[in-house]
Image (tube, rainbow, N blue to C red):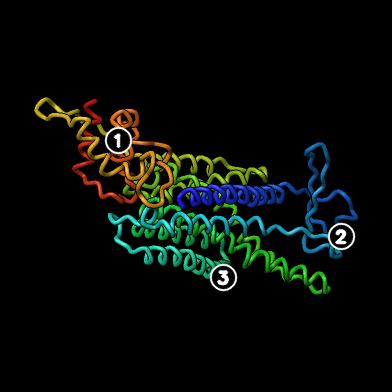
């Protein structure tokens, strides 16, 4: 069963990565295209309502893209829609969320040192965040605040701060981060499914029936599309953050989430403006500054502690092995005994003294510095046991 789950996770990640590349790639391309359009050269094109065009060369061929101010004079025979990239990315992401974080809630989602939750309560809270978060976001956009993009952006940023902080008060860091990213992804795909695509369908129907196109559909779609492009880099950060315990395991992990959200959004602001040819460096500088500040928050300032003195005898390797055997080898073994693990995480096996010596740096970092292991403190390692590992490591 463990091997089957591993393969399901592998194929799910592969699909999620592939569809995500397709969705984000097309999104970035159309933002770039929109910002590089020039007025049409042909008087006939201008007369037919072409607002901008772009010539490009790629793969040995020349391409001409044109954008209409409203709609073309008549419906083209073939019209391509960009939606299944978004839907497939969300569906594969939800598959992974359910498989890893909801079915394995005791391992990856619940941390009793943060909040003691039952399996059902943890999954229910996670689902409520996704649904409730989208509803709140959507209503904010539809409220009078939505008429002023600056005010709306400020309120939405405050909303994301609240989400990040509250998730980190409910779940372990890893689970909190992935649910923050899942909420952003849900907002992005719901923008496509409930705002952008329905608006485009109404525009197509109006063109087919000869009725005037409602400009509000275009305005709403444009607003949500802009939100999606600024959320792209933050959600990508969350997708890879579970490989870096320093980001999610600290006391200020929620602030790391916000810092990376700000950094990603500002960097994207810079590149969008750069496409238009009038980019200020201030957003890019702000994004880099946010990255630097977040790195400091995530990793903390260095501390220097003295190694044990003669009067303070350092623990022996046997004492450390006793701690590792009791708290770590249930997962980090050639044949793990902990449910849900078909193989040792990251291929690290800690069954013998030589293994402990080999991975001493990782053991110290994960159990003492980051306190990221055991995951969710499943095996209930104590502070005294962490101290044994620390004293031994510093005496080496």
User: In which quadrant of the rendered view does residue 304 lie?
Assistant: top left
Which residue: 34% across, 31% down? 359
Q: Which residue is mark 1?
A: 364
Coordinates of residue 367 in the picture (x, y in percent): 30, 40
Quarter placement of the C terminus? top left
The foreground one among 290 and 193 is: 193
Q: Are marks 3 and 2 in contact (CB under 8 Å)?
A: no
Q: CA distance from mark 1 to mark 3?
A: 50 Å
Q: Earlier in the sequence, mark 2 or mark 1?
A: 2
Q: CA distance from mark 3 to mark 2?
A: 33 Å
Which residue: 25% across, 43% down? 326
- Decide if residue 209 is on the left or right side of residue 259: right
Q: Earlier in the sequence, mark 3 or mark 2?
A: 2
Q: CA distance from mark 2 to mark 1?
A: 68 Å
The foreground one among 329 and 204 is: 329
Please rate how many residues cluster around mark 1, counting C-alpha atoms within 10 Å: few if below 14, some from 14 to 19, many from 20. Answer: many
Q: Height in image: 338 above or below 127? A: above
Check disc 1 and report its element: helix, strand or loop: helix
Q: Are marks 1 and 3 in contact (CB under 8 Å)?
A: no
Q: Earlier in the sequence, mark 1 or mark 3?
A: 3
Q: Height in image: 138 above or below 261? A: below
Q: Which residue is mark 2?
A: 48
Residue 265 visible? The answer is no
Q: Which residue is mark 3?
A: 142
Coordinates of residue 127 in the picture (x, y in percent): 46, 65
Check disc 3 and report its element: helix, strand or loop: helix
């Amino acid at each position: 069963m463990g091997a089957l789950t591993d393969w399901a996770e592998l194929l799910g990640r592969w699909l999620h990565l592939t569809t995500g590349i397709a969705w984000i790639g097309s999104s970035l391309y159309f933002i770039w295209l929109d910002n590089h359009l020039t007025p049409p050269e042909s008087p006939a094109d201008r007369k037919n309502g072409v607002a901008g065009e772009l010539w490009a060369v790629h793969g040995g061929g020349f391409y001409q893209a044109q954008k209409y101010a409203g709609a073309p004079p008549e419906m083209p025979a073939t019209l391509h829609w960009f939606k299944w990239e978004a839907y497939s990315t969300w569906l594969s992401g939800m598959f992974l969320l359910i498989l890893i974080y909801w079915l394995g809630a005791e391992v990856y989602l619940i941390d009793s040192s943060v909040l003691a939750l039952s399996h059902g309560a943890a999954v229910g809270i996670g689902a409520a965040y996704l649904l409730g978060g989208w509803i709140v976001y959507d209503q904010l956009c539809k409220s009078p605040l939505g008429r002023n993009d600056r005010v709306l952006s400020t309120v939405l940023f405050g909303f994301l701060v609240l989400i990040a902080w509250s998730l980190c008060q409910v779940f372990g860091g890893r689970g909190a981060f992935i649910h923050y990213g899942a909420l952003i992804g849900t907002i992005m795909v719901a923008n496509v499914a409930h705002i952008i695509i329905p608006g485009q369908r109404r525009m197509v129907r109006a063109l087919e029936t000869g009725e005037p196109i409602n400009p509000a559909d275009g305005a709403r779609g444009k607003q949500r599309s802009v939100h999606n492009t600024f959320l792209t880099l933050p959600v990508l950060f969350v997708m890879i953050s579970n490989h870096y315990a320093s980001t999610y395991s600290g006391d200020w992990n929620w602030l790391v989430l916000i810092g990376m959200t700000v950094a990603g959004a500002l960097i994207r602001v810079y590149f969008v403006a750069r496409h238009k040819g009038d980019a200020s460096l201030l957003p890019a500088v702000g994004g880099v500054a946010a990255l630097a500040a977040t790195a400091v928050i995530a990793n903390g300032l260095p501390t220097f502690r003295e190694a044990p003195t003669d009067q303070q005898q350092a623990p022996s390797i046997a004492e450390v092995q006793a701690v590792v055997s009791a708290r770590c080898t249930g997962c980090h073994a050639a044949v793990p005994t902990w449910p849900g693990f078909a193989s040792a995480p990251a291929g690290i096996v800690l069954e013998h003294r030589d293994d402990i010596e080999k991975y001493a740096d990782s053991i110290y970092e994960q159990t003492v510095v980051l306190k990221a292991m055991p995951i969710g403190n499943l095996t209930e390692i104590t502070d005294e046991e962490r101290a044994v590992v620390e004293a031994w490591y510093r005496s080496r």
